[in-house]
Amino acid sequence: MKSYSRTLRTLILGSTALALTAVPATAQVLAITGGRVFPVSGPPIDGGTVIVTNGKITAVGANLSIPDGAQRIDASGKWVTPGFINSSTQLGVIEVSQVSNTRDMSARGKDNIAAAFTVWEGLNPNSVMLAPARNEGITTVAVLPAGGLVSGQAALLNVVPGTTTDMIIRAPIAMVAEIGDASSAGVSSRGELVVKLRELLEDTRFFQTRRAAYERAETRDFAASRLDLQAMIPVIEGRLPLIITVDRASDIDAALRVAREFNLRIIIGGGAEAWMMADRLAAARVPVLTGAMNNIPGGFAALGQRQENAALLRRAGVAVALIGNAGGGDEEAFNVRNLKQEAGNAVAYGMTWDDALRAVTMTPAEVFGVSNRLGSLQPGRDANVVIWSGDPFEFTTRAERVFINGREYPGMTRQDMLTERYKRLPNTYNTPGVR
Amino acid sequence: MRAFVCVMLAVSAGCATGRAPVTTIPPRTAADSTGSVGLGAVSTPNADPFPSTYAPYPARTTVIRGVNIFTAAGPLIRNGAILLQNGKVAAVGQSVDAPPDAVVIDAAGKYVTPGLIDSHSHLGVYASPGGSALSDGNEATNPTTPHVWAEHSVWPQDPQFPRNLAGGVTTLQVLPGSANLIGGRSVVLKVVPSRTVQGMKFPGAKYGLKMACGENPKRVYQTRGPATRMGNVAGYRSAWIAAEAYRRRWDKWNTDRKGDAPTRDLGNETLAEVLRGNILIHNHCYRADEMAQMIDIAKEFGYRIRSFHHGVEAYKLADVLAREGISGSLWSDWGSFKMEALDAVRANLALVDRAGARAIVHSDDPSGSQRLTQEAAKAMAAGIAAGIPVTEEQAIRWVTINPAWSLGLDDRIGSLEAGKNADVVLWSANPFSVYARPEKVWVDGALLYDRLDRAQHWRTDFELGFVPFDRN
């Protein structure tokens, strides 16, 4: 949670509106000095400096000379990392999950195929869920569609206020398919589910090579609509990865077979039993998005669920990006911020600390093809930087300063406002925090 | 969202056809001699027709020394020692005398806490691997079902139990779900292997009664009612009116034994026991305004609410909760998943604690239940960030002595003091660190979990062959 004294100071100096607006850095150049810097792309630097110029990182190292006119930020005793990336969220597309008209993460599609669905088009950049995530060091999120066999396309966004256009880093970053549950895909068994996925891939291939005939209505019927087939083309061309949400080891095996057959680039999402397939996933260079906070054999497809999953995969050489998987508390929106708890638990269950940090920064950036912009502190990267009061995975540690493209957005969250309002009982109904 | 899932599952739940567990019911001491009336026809206060058969597992005298001890009854004892003997905490302090037969554990740098207590669990009633066959937590056939008892749904082979023990949890309250206004009796269980639920029941623990406010009942019964919050309130009051009449009839008959005994009614019997103070109320309620109404209903009928569960708005009513002596069984950071959960704040526990009410970290979730100290740590950190000082000594109470109080068991468990049950957890590090894990867990002095001794790990029947690894 944000420092109240700092937010209050902001509010006292200005107006409530100020807290809701981006506060541009007073100088074009920022120098974050004296911190324990974790570039992720290289070893940590004690007493390191990070120089940010016009929203980009321009230098990282020890004993750097600070440009004249730079705004100095003293990070002595603090830890400095890249902004955290949560690789599987529904931030901005679910506000109140039990209020149906605030749920915009699923498409009806046709016959459980919704490849054309671009989930970010329905995203609410004014969601009150954004600030809590950002204030706790999540600077970037992947927003994934959900449901059906092919759920649609995912986007990678910075957690900044403004418009969706302002937020988008890359869209799409992946197509999402779910092959874990036959009934939600409208078929009777796991095998039939794979048949249906193959049919879609074959039809896409056919559609791609017979476009002219299709336009003349001289082709046979396809398993999906024109828009869906078109959206699948980058997938079969290997240009757009396919995130396959799946838990059971045998289903992961099936996904690997399909990927080989069609030359797809796939990413396993969830992957409760992925550790049982670790060597094959490593050999096929298939990354896995998974968490470290669930060991419940919650269904017959997840009997092998365990908290060591991420660590075992990493040890086998699989690229792992951590996501929320505790299964209880809204980790797709309200608790996107709990990614650091996943990382800490990954360490408690066998992952190295460095790998855990990588799994919330550089690895997701690589998986989604944006490592030239995000995920590490190197010259040329976007200045998504967090200054932590200590080890970022510990509960008592706070994200003290959060920069996205070199800017801070220090507003109070809705929860902060409620807390302020009810700190003294009976409460008043004035604007909280404004004296 | 477990709460949501529970209710959804309930709607499609099939009915279980399993056999009753094979249990030998020991002969009861005849509480009364009613002549022609059989025991089962008489409504007797504090009757115990499914008595606990729990017997502690074999225990060895144990000393843990050189260890940091959160007693939940005072300041952290650094580099201290604790003696477990005859199933009880025999001594705790800077040092203890180790009897010659004691197992001595040198635990330098590690931490000891009381066994953790989760006041809100559905283990066994929503057992893994889930599905309708194991969905036994909501008798969603009528909005008022005080006649059902959660223990009759508990599957002792739920693989979630050993995971909970490995998370340091030694006592659970298993509740019915929140589909109903009055959902039925809860049961307090020890997290121990057993063939039967009776073998897990905490001897002498009071029953709880689950009540639920707000959205869940009115959603589940939308077509038949209650369909509104005012319908909910009318439902509670109608039930208590009938129960009070029932209590009077039976209390009179139990006193004078004149004439025919009144007809026994399971639902009213449970409610009458609440009115007599023999069953504790555990009330699922999110919003402050609804909690205030539930307090008025309790006053109208002369019972007390022991704990509001979920209480995401407890911080708005913290002064009232303190005044009324009602605890808050709360999440550290769940919220926003439905309208009545919209105003969740992470400082909830800290604000409730500061107001002088008992704050409790509860889980309502088989996964979160394994990380109660992590949840407490988040709530503590949020309090501190909001300018409310919270110490680790305070936060440990949220997962130990406070939930013990909510179950009426604070004289036996929840703190490490001489004479208390030896429910103890040895942690690899400070339990409020994300990196800490339980290494050993004792229940009544018996070592039931040892992370390093895999051969001794409790594996449920279900796990055999199905779960493809050795859990640690």
Image (spheres, coloured by chain):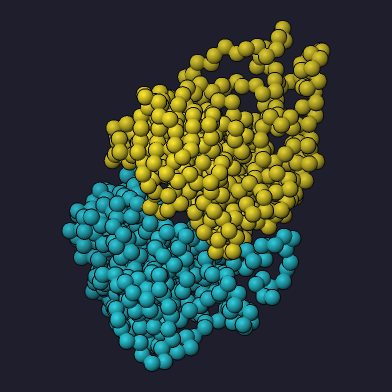
Q: Quadrant of residue A378?
A: bottom left
The tint of chain B in the picture is yellow
Q: Quadrant of residue A48?
A: bottom left
Q: In the orientation shown, which residue stands out farthest toward the top?
A: B35
Horizontal arrangement in the rendering, residue A176 relative to residue B153 (left or right): left
Horizontal arrangement in the rendering, residue B139 relative to residue A150 (left or right): right
Q: Is residue A347 above or below residue B30?
A: below
The residue lying at 51 percent from left, 77 percent from top is A409
In the image, residue A87 lies at what x, y percent?
Answer: 37, 65
The residue lying at 67 percent from left, 14 percent from top is B31
Horizontal arrangement in the rendering, residue A359 relative to residue A418 (left or right): left
In the image, residue B463 lies at what x, y percent?
Answer: 34, 35
The residue lying at 29 percent from left, 70 percent from top is A44
- The one of B128 and A113 positioned closer to us in this rendering: B128
- The one of B43 and A194 positioned closer to us in this rendering: B43
Q: Is residue B214 visible?
A: no
Q: In the orientation shown, which residue stands out farthest toward the bottom?
A: A68
The residue lying at 44 percent from left, 41 percent from top is B80
In the image, residue B35 lies at what x, y percent?
Answer: 72, 7
The tint of chain A in the picture is cyan
> Where's the C terminus of chain B, which quadrant?
top left
